[in-house]
Image: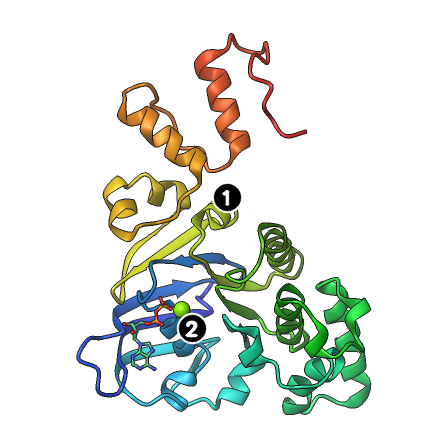
């Protein structure tokens, strides 16, 4: 087994003056090349966990903590954030708060300058990052003229330009329409598949997450309450209800069928899978009695 690239050990964190732990006794190991979905209701501690990974906690955010976070072998408490930024890229929930420059090109250059990347290489990296995110045409545009989705892509390109081994994205689709959300998600899948990038995607829309990631971690009141394949997580009726997980409608449908005793198979996570299951249940095998599959 490969050594984890992220190791969180018995990590507990209290914001200043807070009586309740924002994170409590977190243990999590993530291996290089994993694509992990992190979900849970508002206030569960997802953003706090992001801040613990990129070193903002404890380097810039005060509070009390116990335990240890290690990223690529470096203890985040003793490694400067600037050094960590080259290893673990972050995309925050609100791109407005993250973007600092006038134009798209300057935004991408900003992070590279901080890492003291030489001019020539900088230009090449900017070109490549814009291509990866498919926004080459926006290179010279002012950020103020971009849509929310375009800004989100710029934030992702800026993180990708640093060529980090890990990318953490905090609800990158929360402001986006379904189509742009899907574009972002497909993009992340390519980063993971083609570049072996380790990705942690924080996402409340489980219907987006479940078909995408092999591993889903659920946070609730600062604790990890599930860490398994999405199908196994969604199998836990009580957990789904307690966390109010926004699960795919097709999964809900089959959970209802199962409760009624009419279904005993694996829960489908996507419509296509649901259609296949329905065919098996209702139609004579192979007749395509329910031709509802997307073409
Ligand atoms: N700067 C802060 N100061 C004090 N408490 C905070 C701060 N940021 C978040 N919290 C609290 O920490 C808990 C976890 O918040 P957060 O990590 O933002 O959750 P999530 O991202 O899952 O919505 C919540 O109870 C929240 O109110
Ligand atoms: Mg959050």
Q: Is residue 283 above or below residue 19?
A: above
The circle on residue 50 is: 2
Q: Is mark 1 within 8 Å of ligand 1?
A: no
Q: Is residue 130 above or below residue 85?
A: above
Taking the image as shown, residue 34 lies to the left or right of residue 232, namely: right
Task: Identify the coloring.
Answer: rainbow
Taking the image as shown, residue 15 lies to the left or right of residue 247, namely: left
Badge 1 is on which residue? 211
Check if mark 2's residue and mark 1's residue have beta carbons within 8 Å.
no
Taking the image as shown, residue 86 lies to the left or right of residue 146, namely: left
Q: Residue furthest left?
A: 19
Q: What x and y, as percent, mark residue 57?
A: 38, 83
Q: What x and y, as percent, mark residue 181?
A: 58, 55
Quadrant where the image shows the C terminus: top right
Viewer-closest of 53 and 6: 53
Q: Is mark 2 within 8 Å of ligand 2?
A: yes
Viewer-closest of 7 and 111: 111
Quadrant where the image shows the N terminus: bottom left
Q: Residue furthest front?
A: 145
Q: Is residue 71 above or below residue 244?
A: below
- Circle 2 packing at 10 Å, graded few (<14), some (14-19), many (20+), is many
Give the quadrant of ligand 1: bottom left
Residue placed at 57% from the left, 59% from the top?
176
Q: What x and y, as percent, mark residue 144?
A: 69, 78
- Circle 1 packing at 10 Å, graded few (<14), some (14-19), many (20+), is some
Q: What x and y, as percent, mark residue 282?
A: 45, 12
């Amino acid at each position: 087994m490969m050594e984890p690239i992220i190791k969180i050990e018995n990590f507990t964190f209290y914001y200043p003056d807070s009586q309740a732990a924002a994170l409590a006794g977190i243990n999590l190991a993530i291996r290089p090349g994993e694509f992990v979905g992190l979900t849970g209701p508002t206030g569960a501690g997802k953003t706090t966990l992001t801040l613990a990974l990129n070193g903002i906690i404890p380097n810039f955010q005060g509070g009390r903590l116990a335990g240890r976070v290690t990223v690529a072998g470096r203890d985040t408490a003793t490694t400067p954030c600037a050094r960590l930024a080259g290893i673990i890229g972050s995309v925050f929930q609100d791109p407005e708060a993250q973007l600092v420059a006038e134009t798209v090109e300057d935004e991408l250059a900003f992070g590279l300058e901080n890492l003291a990347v030489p001019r020539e290489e900088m230009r090449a990296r900017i070109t490549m990052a814009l291509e990866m995110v498919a926004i080459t045409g926006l290179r010279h545009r002012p950020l103020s003229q971009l849509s929310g989705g375009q800004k989100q892509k710029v934030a992702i390109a800026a993180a990708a330009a640093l060529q980090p081994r890990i990318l953490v994205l905090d609800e990158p689709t929360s402001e986006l329409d379904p189509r742009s959300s899907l574009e972002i998600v497909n993009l992340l899948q390519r980063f993971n598949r083609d570049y072996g990038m380790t990705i942690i995607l924080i996402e409340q829309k489980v219907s987006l997450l479940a078909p995408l990631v092999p591993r889903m971690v659920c946070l609730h009141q600062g604790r990890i309450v599930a860490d398994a394949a999405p199908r196994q997580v969604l199998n836990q009726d009580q957990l789904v209800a307690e966390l109010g997980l926004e699960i795919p409608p097709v999964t809900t449908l089959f959970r209802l069928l199962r409760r009624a005793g009419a279904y005993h198979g694996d829960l489908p996570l996507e419509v296509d899978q649901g259609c296949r299951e329905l065919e098996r249940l209702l139609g004579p095998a192979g007749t395509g009695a329910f031709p509802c599959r997307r073409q």
